[in-house]
Image (cartoon, helix red, strand yellow):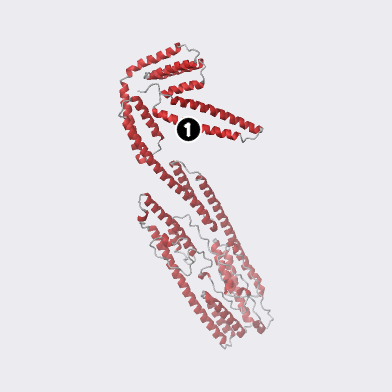
Amino acid sequence: MEDLNEMQPGLVSEPTLTAEPTESQEPTTSAPEAIESVETPAVDPVETPAEAAPEAVETTAEATPEAVEPVHEEPAVAPEPEEPVAEAVEAAEPAPEAVEPTPEVAEPIPDYSALSREELLAALNELLEGDIVKLRNHASAIRNQFNILNKEVEKQALEAFVAEGGNQEEYNPQPDALAEAFYKAYDTYRTRRQQMLEEIEVQKKRNLEAKQQLLEELRTLIDRDEENLKQTYDDFNAIQEKWKTIGDVPRESMNDLWQNHHFLIEQFFNKVKINKELRMLDLKRNLEQKLQLCEKAEELMVETSVTKAFKVLQELRNQWKEIGPVPAEQNEETWQRFNNAANQIDERRREYYDQRKEELDQNLLAKEALVEKAHELTAQLPTTVKDWNKTSDELNELLKLWKSIGPVPHDKNEDIWNRFKGVIDKHFADKKLYFGQVRDEQTENYNKKLDLCLRAEAIAKREDWKKATEELLALQEEWKAVGPTNRKVSDKIWHRFRGACDEFFSKKGKHFKDIRSTENENLAVKQGIIEELKAHTFGDDKDENLAAIKDYQRRWAEVGFVPIKEKERLQKEYRALIDGIFEKLKISAREADEASYRERVQNMGSRTKNSEQQELTEHIAKMRSDLKLWENNLGFLANSKQADLLKEEFEKKMQHARQEIALMEARLRILNEPKEEEEK
């Protein structure tokens, strides 16, 4: 675990409390205030196995709900009524009911992993209003979670500073009012807790002095000559009552104190020889006290708070243990009454923790489902800014849903949270990297588009309309191929490029507006070419026929514009006539394609031609590679009916690939043919 001072520069190092484990340790024993001294019943002179030493009943660890078993008690054996008083006193006193101590169960620590820094501060302030000593683990859990979140906030602030162009070495963290408020509140908690622990230790020392004083009074009572046995017994009971009202003593003094107290009680009984009548009075008094405890235990059966009922029951059990025996004929009945009520409360508590465990398990299943959903959302990296933002929104929705789910089992909490947070952190780290690459690409795209703007502005000043138009259209195609730029400059650079294009085509339109008068003449020329085609007689020589058709196509392409309303009709009539001639002359589709492609090539600009040549070359190379791979794969197929079918499919694909290669090579040859005449 990282040191708090490393996470919060400038904070004063916290003093180490002797009663509180460090951050790197989990508490393994209860706090000192949870250790209760063992009281000895007023009428028990014999040390029983259940009360051999204070350590036997000392609470040393927090018990889980499953570890708490109902207390069982053996009925005491009262002396027979006919027994002489002297014998009854000198004989061993019956042992009190062997009530096994039940460890105190600490309330489970809430799940703070999904809280924000503001919520953690509120939770810490709320703890300051409670039992600070017993809520140590709560406060430590809140602080640890706050340290994690605070470190993330500082990391994000540093990254933002660097992202804005700052030097990491020059970074100076800004004051964080929320963090200062939290650590101030935590210092208050530590100070108050230390004060309370010190006060507890002081009080324990006072209790030790008070009990030592009672031991002196008990010695005095034993040494005193008193004929009135009842008065002596009353004084003895008064000392015992005072003893019970005094709280805990320091741990190191408990054993000696208990042994001295037990020894003096035995000495007292040996001296005063309590008679049977006084003994019966004591048994009746014990019976009344235990009946009162039975009533209180039965009242707890209707207590709505299971935790409160169990806590009070533990106190009643401790009180029961301190009370001496009752008359033998009522001992079993009294104990069964108390034990029945205690068992029902224990059962309610087991059911409560079973239900709570089921809820925690259900919450764990729900959070595991969210982890799987997060993995599913981030399984593939998005390829667009829109997709990245969509995934981020969906993950944020999952995080909101996560916070709405209750806690999970404590031993699973850190693992499930780290898994979920790890997916989210990785997504946003990848997103940050992607957006950095996008910014670099946008900068490069901006430079490319800026170059296109300069070239377009240069073309806009030219008047070689055909060539300039081809180049400008090629620039527009290049513009489309260039990726997006930053939105801040996107519109500006586009308007600049569009302005250059508009300027050129506006000048061109104005130029050709003056030559619209020739459109009707061009219409008549093209109509004449159609009539010539209809009247032309083709021979048997395919090459001559193709040359004639090519000549017609060249003449057709050289004719200028025709009226727009006649353009589509005229083109359809011409195309249908050419197709009909091909069909009539039995010219193959490939030959026709070559002729048509040759006609299209004649209208290509130099840039378009180069691009077409490169694309065909790459496509031919890829097809040849595929063909070679298929031929190689055929050699591995075994002779079988299934393999023959597969070979047949491969042969079809390979034949189609060969035909396509031949067609593309023919087109490449056409592209490489020298132009018959230079375009003007």
Based on the displayed image, in which of its 4 quarters is residue 151 positioned? bottom left
Residue at (54%, 76%) from the top-left corner? 254
Left or right? Give the position of 473 relative to 313.
Answer: left
Based on the displayed image, in which of its 4 quarters is residue 448 positioned? top left
In the rendered image, residue 656, in percent from the top left (x then y), is placed at 55, 28
Callout count: 1
Q: Quadrant of the C terminus?
A: top left
Residue at (51%, 21%) from the top-left corner? 589
User: Foreground: 33 or 461?
Assistant: 461
Based on the displayed image, in which of its 4 quarters is residue 604 positioned? top left
Say if residue 66 shows up in the picture: yes
Left or right? Give the position of 528 relative to 585.
Answer: left
Say if residue 289 shows up in the picture: no
User: Foreground: 12 or 183?
Assistant: 12
Q: Callout 1: 10 Å neighbours few (<14), some, many (20+)? A: few
Residue at (43%, 47%) from the top-left corner? 432
Amino acid bearing label 1: Glu
User: Foreground: 416 or 10?
Assistant: 10
Give the farthest residue toward the front.
674
In the rendered image, residue 626, in percent from the top left (x then y), is placed at 54, 33
Left or right? Give the position of 28 relative to 161.
Answer: right
Helix, strand or loop at disc 1?
helix
Question: Height in image: 493 above or below 335?
Answer: above
In the rendered image, residue 579, in percent from the top left (x then y), is placed at 48, 18
In the rendered image, residue 206, in percent from the top left (x then y), is placed at 48, 77
Determine which residue is flagged by label 1: 618
User: Foreground: 674 or 388?
Assistant: 674
